[in-house]
Amino acid sequence: MTAIVFGHGTQLMFEVTILVLAIFLGFEVISKVPTLLHTPLMSGTNAIHGIVIVGAMLVLGTAHKGPFLWVVGFVAVVLASANVVGGFVVTDRMLEMFKKREPAEPDEAPRDDERS
Amino acid sequence: MSYPVTNLLYLVTIVTFILALRYLSNPAHARRGNQIGAVGMLLAIVVTWVKVGGTSWWAIALGMAIGGGFGAYAARKVRMTAMPQMVALFNGVGGGAAALIALAELHRVVPPPGRASFDISTAIALSGLIGAISFAGSMVAFAKLQELIQGRPITYPGQKIVNLVLLAACVGLAVAIAAGAQHQWLLWAAVGGGALFGVLFVLPIGGADMPVVISLLNAFTGLAVAVGGFELENNVLIVSGMLVGASGTLLTLMMGRAMNRSIANVLFGAFGQVVAPAAGADGAASAGGSVRSASAEDVAVMLAYAHKVVFVPGYGLAVAQAQHDVRQLADLLEGKGVEVSYAIHPVAGRMPGHMNVLLAEANVPYPQLKEMDEANPEFSRTDVAVIVGANDVVNPDARSNQGSPIYGMPILNVDDAQAVVVLKRSMNPGFAGIENPLFYNPKTVMLFGDAKESIVKLVADVKTL
């Protein structure tokens, strides 16, 4: 076994730093969400971890290097896009329902919950 | 696009996600926050698209069309009562994607003479393992909530030892990969073992503990994505994943606190098995009283002439799909000058905040939805507390009976109200099989029957008054 090789040290240190900061930021922001909205919080954060689609696209972008990467990348893109679209749409549907008093007329402004 | 431009645009995405979470602090503009987050996501996708370029664009488009189409369809069609399983499903596919990315990355960097550096291979091993656990665990949670498999804990002798050994083996494989043994079969074994562990660790967890499990799996997926950011050296994955990880962790802790149980107890306690009769006998003995049952007409009179009525919903409300009928009853009562609100326990339902979503769907204005700390002082001024499909969260044994399995769990003090009406199918103990002395309280009347039918009858009877 050869000696353990670290990647470029500054990049790694930078990444660890933002990771730790993100933890504290996350706790700070999330603790202000009222229990009323905990379900939309879950589905909203669900949508946010759909950012994994970026990774899936990068993998599929290397598909020319072989069929294995093609298949795995493709399945990852399918899963991640279901995550992204489903997460945002379902959160939108939920948050739309939270109202102070019901509106006078049931059909209000046109729905705008389509997105990529 | 150059490296700094790409990363600046990714930073914009990060900011939109943080704003999306910040906007969630107030229901009045939470929806706008979600839309901002969606725009940020779209930006990240476009940036990555341009960056990837090349020949795979059609494969990416096809994959996004299939996945996105399914996601949009499912998200539009799902009923609000089925939200917990939907969240579990989307959570699982995210974890699955993270695990697949790990497999692909190892495949890409490993071919000889290449060798991934220590940090990259650690990230690959971790995100593969955690992603697999999250994927498989979420799928089992989905199956349980969808009632494809039974919701009660599934246990067998030696379960904890099997799980522990399996987890240790997976961690061992991950360490080996991180330490430099970069054979692809090792990662496949770790991912397969992780998936098996995900299945085995969710199986023994009962339906009533699902709020904790779903939160925890949410945290796992976030973590897998964040670690995936290390292997791809991509900041937007690191920050977004960790925001989700923090959110899931915080929710898990909150749910544990709301049940007064440690997370370890929830995960390994197989709570909600058929409880030994001793506990039941104990509870019944201490209660000692008899059960009073009432007709819908009686209850309608009680409600119509009250000053203040508080509804206490539980999972039974979701099962019976009775949220719209409850709202209708509340409207009628408000028309008669009764003050109506809803007291919501943090772990009522199958995921954090489940009841709030159901009632919001039925157009209940959210200022009427009171969380536990706000609701409890109100009960002493309440004439009638109406319990619809809740049980453990109103069980006074949690306050007073040290022998009860739920002793110490914070509950809604409905027995402070002048009168309590319990809508219940029969005298069978609830999901966790725990005796509830509230039913024997002289203040309590039982209205037996399906929750939805009972409420419909109440609506009809209140109308005639």
Image (cartoon, grey):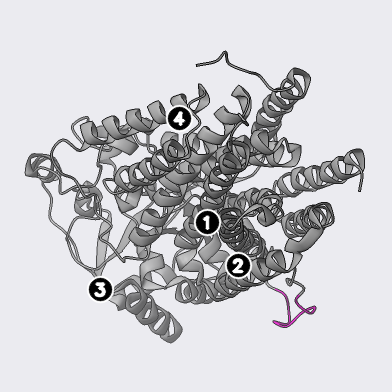
In the rendered structure, which amino acid carries the disc numbered 4?
Ala
Asked whether, in this view, residue B116 is left or right of residue B408, the answer is: right
In the rendered structure, which amino acid carries the disc numbered 1?
Val
- Residue B284 visible at all: yes
State the separation of the CA atoms marked 4 and 2.
Answer: 30 Å
In the rendered structure, which amino acid carries the disc numbered 3?
Gly
Of the two numbered discs 1 and 2 on the same chain, state the one appearing first in sequence.
2
State the separation of the CA atoms marked 4 and 1.
Answer: 22 Å
- As rendered, which of A39 and B361 lies closer to the eye? A39
Where is mark 2, residue-wise? B67
Where is mark 1, residue-wise? B93
The numbered mark at residue B174 is 4
**Which label sits in the foreground, 4 or 3?**
4
Query: As displayed, is residue B64 above or below residue B405?
Result: below
State the separation of the CA atoms marked 2 and 3.
Answer: 42 Å
**Residue at horizontal 61%, vertical 54%?**
A66
Instruction: Mark 1 vs mark 2: tell me if same chain.
Output: yes
Chain identity of mark 4: B
- Magenta span: A103-111
- As rendered, which of B48 and B367 lies closer to the eye? B48
In the rendered structure, which amino acid carries the disc numbered 2?
Gly
Instruction: Mark 1 vs mark 3: tell me if same chain.
Output: yes
